[in-house]
Amino acid sequence: MNWILLVIAGLFEVAFASCLGKAKETSGTEMYLWYTGFLITMTISMLLLIKATQTLPIGTAYAVWTGIGAVGTVLMGIFFFKDPVSFWRVFFIVTLIASVIGLKAVSSH
């Protein structure tokens, strides 16, 4: 169950990073709404991470959380914020995904 919470926490990390990206593109009231979304999603992400680390090793949980966030944020950047795509960028995203899967596979929980 805590692995599921950890994955959801990682997805909320993607959400809060995406909110920052949208806030950067807007101004006025809309910008403040995106910053509010950032604060809400960051809080949810952190609370879920805290819950997951009650039974999962902190090093593994944190690495998986940041890996999900990093990969998700890069993909959001590519698909929604027009970030550049190159062979090496995709290559290292794939190696990061493989590392997250590897950490899950060798975890004792």
Image: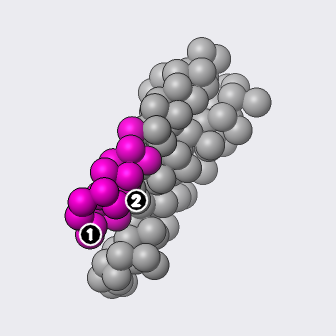
Graded by Cα atoms within 10 Å as few (under 14), some (14 to 19) or many (20 or more), the crowding at tag 1 reads few
Graded by Cα atoms within 10 Å as few (under 14), some (14 to 19) or many (20 or more), the crowding at tag 2 reads many
2 sits left or right of 65 in the view: right
Report how far apart the C-alphas of labels 2 and 1 lie in the structure.
11 Å
| SS type, badge 2 | helix
Residue depicted at x 36% and y 76%: 81
53 sits left or right of 84 in the view: right
| SS type, badge 1 | helix
Looking at the image, is 63 positioned above or below residue 20?
A: above
Where on the picture, by quarter, is residue 104?
Answer: top right
The residue pinned by badge 2 equals 18
The residue pinned by badge 1 equals 25
Residue that extends furthest to the top in the rendered view of this protein: 54
Residue depicted at x 40% and y 59%: 18
Residue 109 in the image: state x and y as whole percent.
70, 26
Residue 47 in the image: state x and y as whole percent.
52, 26
Looking at the image, is 46 positioned above or below residue 74?
A: above
Kind of residue at disc 1: Glu
Q: Which residues are magenta?
A: 21-39
Looking at the image, is 24 positioned above or below residue 4?
A: below
Residue 86 in the image: state x and y as whole percent.
33, 84
Residue 1 in the image: state x and y as whole percent.
76, 30
Kind of residue at disc 2: Ser
